[in-house]
Amino acid sequence: MSEDLTPVLIGVGQVTDKGRDLDDLPGPVGLIEQAVRRAFDDAGIGAARAADLDLIAVVRSFRESTPNTPASVARRLGAEKALCRLMPNGGNGPQYLVNRYAEAIAKGKNRFVLFAGAEAKDSVRRLKKAGRPIDWAEPPETEAEFLAPEPKMASGYETSHGVWLAAHVYPMFENAYRHHLGRGIGEHQMAMGRLFERFTEVAAATPGAWFPTRRTAEEIATPGPDNRFVGWPYTKFMNAMNHVDQSAAILMTSRGFAREMGVPQDRLVHLHGCADTNEPLLVSERQTYHDCPAVRMMGRKALDMAGTDIGAIDHFDLYSCFPVAVEIARDELGIPADDPRPLTVTGGLPYHGGAGNNYVMNSIAAMADRVRARPGSKGMVTANGGFLTKHAAGIYSTEPSPAHDGRGWRRENPAVYQAELDALATPPVVKAAEGDAVVETYTVAFGRGGEPEGGILFGRLGNGTDPMAPRFIANTPPDPDLLRAMTEEDFIGRRGRVANADRRNTMMF
């Protein structure tokens, strides 16, 4: 394979649009256009080169503002030849796109591609508050075609018990992780605060951060009027911030076409290693809740492809929707808990702002800037979609990878190692649960007034000694004293009885 087909990032662009007059809001397509034009400027080539694009892939926003966002972007740019596709929901999307089309470029199937996305939820919030209409529709009127299938991330069984909202699902992973470490509730609360304190330090130094404010561990971990619990043990300051107006874009091509277009050498960023993995689609069908085999496999495969190890990575951006996403990724990748290397280059989803499914586009753009500032250094980006469900990683550097010398850029087919993950044994799931049971993990959902409203848990039938005992989902009675106790005592391993009525399980203690 010719070196000329080595895939490279050549241009990145990011936009944070805050406080604009209501009569001048750009909307998602406008935000994307701004980021794309910045990416062309970053590459040192004019936006007229958009005519050479053969693919435009846009990451789906939470609220699609027009029937065919990719085609609308192409129309604005004059990219008439580009195949236009929409990437389905999932925070793994941007890194998945880089991985997939790096391979396509290396095989000569694509030559010049654009990835972009945006979220304008802050504009939506402001317009609704002002009683103003929201209409950002623009041509064409044809519906967008998806790049990949979009599976449902929760079953009816899960949804009926409250296992569908990220702010209530991730806390159950967190409590399982805490219990596995043997930490007390207060001790772990401060550990989460210290973890994200470091993220706020990066956000405070990042011009595009939505919340460029340094916060102490105590501020982050302690509930209060401005920092209520959402899904215990997470306070508001520990939750991803989606109500932003942000966008990002990436231009990717081959080294050969980059030279042909006149892209300066110092703009090139190489993908040394990458991997894509998945956990079982449904949260109720996971092997455990305190770790993540898919992240472990993803990290190993990406590092092996790059011919390096975790100790040689200089910069990280670990997906950070909630603390446990960072903690599990850090542990599975083999990064020591006391490692001095920052785990973000943006400030993370709660503080930089997470533009919906597109946050990792910002991560990759920021990582490109970071490795360019230190030529030869290596940066790792991880991405996560769903509920620790869909995973992707990329390892970046300004220099070509020595691991690819003599054989060109190629990666192992993700389906090969995914088969190993799919073969892992998981406990059976029972929908109508009856009898003695133990709590496997849980959370307490809080209302906006700061009061606990309900308990959600995963449990196992029996006495807790059989690792393959049937698993079930249940709620608790809406007893305020019980709900408070569940936030003050560790209920994992607590015994009780579960009963089913009206297609819902309730566990009583």
Image (cartoon, helix red, strand yellow):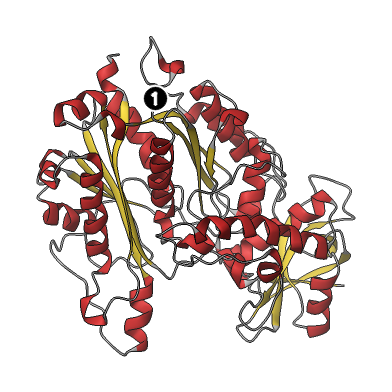
- Indicate left or right for 334 with 88 as reference: right
Looking at the image, the residue that sits furthest to the bottom is: 131
Please provide percent x and percent y for residue 394: 46, 36
The residue pinned by badge 1 equals 399
- Indicate left or right for 456 with 481 as reference: left
| Residue found 39% across the figure and 25% down from its top | 399
Res. 215 image quadrant? bottom right
Looking at the image, the residue that sits furthest to the top is: 406
- Indicate left or right for 390 with 247 as reference: right
The quadrant of the rendering that contains the N terminus is top left
Res. 117 image quadrant? bottom left
Please provide percent x and percent y for residue 146: 30, 50
Q: How many labels were placed on the picture? A: 1
- Between 434 and 134, the residue placed more toward the observer is 134
| Residue found 69% across the figure and 58% down from its top | 194
Residue neighbourhood size for the residue with mark 1, other residues' Cα within 10 Å, grouped as few (<14), some (14–19), many (≥20): some
